[in-house]
Amino acid sequence: MPVLRWLRRHLIVIAGLLTLAYMILPNIVVMVFSFNKPNGRFNYAWQRFSLDAWTDPCGVADMCGSLSLSLQIATWATIGATALGTMIAFALVRYRFRARGAINSLIFLPMAMPEVVMAASLLTLFLNMGAQLGFWTVLIAHIMFCLSFVVTAVKARVMSMDPRLEEAARDLYAGPVQTFLRVTLPIAAPGIAAGALLAFALSFDDFIITNFNAGSTVTFPMFVWGSAQRGTPVQINVIGTAMFIIAVLVVVAGQLIANRRKNSARP
Amino acid sequence: MTQQQTEGGDVRLTGISKTYGSFKAVQPLDLTVPQGSFFALLGASGCGKTTTLRMIAGLEEATTGTISLGGRDITDLPPYKRPVNTVFQSYALFPHLDITENVAFGLRRRGIKSVKKQVDDMLDLVQLGDFAKRKPHQLSGGQQQRVAVARALINHPQVLLLDEPLGALDLKLRRQMQLELKRIQTEVGITFIHVTHDQEEAMTMADTVAVMNAGRVEQLGAPADLYENPKTTFVANFLGTSNLIEGEIAEAGEDILVGAGGMTLRLPAGRCQAPAARGGKLLLGVRPEKISLAHADDADSIAAGRNRVTGRIIDSSFIGVSTQYVVESPAGKALQVYEQNIERDTRLTPGAEVVLHWNPAHTFGLDAAQDIDAGVETVEDAT
């Protein structure tokens, strides 16, 4: 049975392709429908090809404002969570101190807590403290829930780092600052970058916690959710597609740079 | 070593010790390493040799005592301010930098801009000129080891510290690198302090060996001196193999006569490390290769004046260049004898009655109050 034999030989490839298709299909739908010209307000059924949304991405009232706000929050949340998370990760791996074990497990609490519960309790906390809901409460909340992810990513990297490398640097005339900048940071960089990317993605598309704590501020996910009640503008798909393409380009560029480095090292 | 032996660059440890909580890693010790010498700290793992090295490097703070280098007190200097560099056991090459940048690291940190020529020269010295642009993980263990040496040496430190630098290499490569390091040391003339648990390595490379045990220096001296004249049972057993025979002093004088297992053995008083009084206990030592083996039938042909011990062979192993016998005797349960395979006596098989004989001058005497098995390598230790 040649068919069966062919199947058996290519089973892994077929399974891989099917899984890939499963993951990519929704993204393709987003892309395709960014070129749709819907009848009425809902972009749910294919009508005909059009570039209208792409030529006028900010044509929907308030959407680009919310997008810009989301990007700002995501940027600051990434910076905050990455800086704090990196320090926490180093402290947890490198130093022995009281309550280290407790902190090690507490750090995972925000990940384990159901998000909607966390959102509601954060709101309670902010209200009790008399905080003005808006940009700052959202930012504080985002840094909080991104932290666990950054700590996890950086910790894995720091744990695999040989502390002798820093000793070697100090032995070779590098003071504490030089040692950190020239040895510690470059070696931990992949872990820190992974944590930062994760934080950015999590913050950018968070809806539940943001919705509870934003007050009258509207982020991009909130805008999409709100507009879904009244009709979905095609521009949402344009933004989604653009983000997707940028992410893919970043990944491809990273791979290319890594490959070139590897090749140049092998003369 | 002789003409370089000036006061100028000696490393001097005075009363140096290290305590972790209640554990004394290094007992207060005094040690002077003359400038330009190849000095080995030898001991089993956990004897404090690496801690001592790290204190010299500044990577470990001394609990008590002072360290001086060429008369200058460096005890409180951080590692990056000491004119001392280290070759780490794991090499600790920077994985994100290529070989050139690894080697140039120390120069750059001291603000030296044009490093190319020095780096090239140094890579030539360790024969790695073609690998300048590679990353550490693209090199073999032996090559990485040489990069680690180059990275330290390029700074012209007053002292180079080597922490088991050959431990991760296989036997053949290790022998090759021992000679290589010795060559480099002779070429650059820098003081090398080498930490190792491998006694052959220490004896091959170093001018002076300090044998460490439980945080103390047991004995210090030239390799041949340590081997021929061990002062403690630990040194006798740790450096090579020794036959230690327990006996009672029958007569003290220029030659000490010792009774052991019904036989009388002779020991020159000058080679006895313990006070010799009639009736006192003594440990007699003799190295296995100093002993000759004769079949009991030929006992009469043994020259007079030699120490003799009768016994029976219980085991023999042929290892090419020599045959190693284990002999059971009233003087000792398992005496080791190494015989060169020049003319093999076919009667010398397990079960044969034999006479062990050796020149009394090769006997050494140790204090019997010590643990007779101190420093004997057990199966787990032997690597």
Image (cartoon, coloured by chain):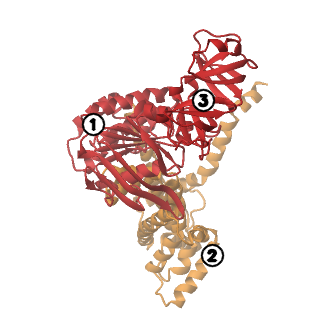
Chain colours: A orange, B red
Q: Is residue A21 above or below residue B240?
A: below
Q: Residues within 10 Å of mark 3 (few under 14, many from 20)?
A: many
Q: Residue at x 75, y 24 (%)?
A: A2
Q: Residue at x 34, y 47 (%)?
A: B32
Q: Residues within 10 Å of mark 1 (few under 14, many from 20)?
A: many
Q: Between marks 3 and 1, how big is the CA–CA gap?
A: 61 Å
Q: Between marks 1 and 2, how big is the CA–CA gap?
A: 60 Å
Q: Nearer the viewer, mark 1 or mark 2?
A: 1
- Please name the residue that numbered disc 2 is placed on: A116
The secondary structure type at the circle numbered 1 is helix
Do the residues indicated by labels 1 and 2 lie within the same chain of the protein?
no
- Residues B34 and A264: in front is B34
The secondary structure type at the circle numbered 2 is helix
Q: Position of residue A149 (x, y in %)?
A: 54, 63
In the rendered picture of this protein, how many numbered marks are placed on residues? 3
The secondary structure type at the circle numbered 3 is strand
**Cβ atoms under marks 1 and 2 closer than 8 Å:** no
Q: Residue at x 52, y 85 (%)?
A: A126
- Please name the residue that numbered disc 1 is placed on: B119
- Report the amino acid beneath label 1: Val
Left or right position of B314 against B154: right
Left or right position of B244 against B185: right
Q: Position of residue B202 (x, y in %)?
A: 45, 35
Do the residues indicated by labels 3 and 1 lie within the same chain of the protein?
yes
For marks 3 and 1 on the same chain, the one whose residue lies earlier in the sequence: 1
Q: Quadrant of residue B181?
A: top left
- Report the amino acid beneath label 3: Leu
Most extreme residue toward the right is A1
- Residue B265 is tagged as 3
Q: Residue at x 50, y 55 (%)?
A: B25
Query: Which quadrant is home to the C terminus of chain B?
Result: top right
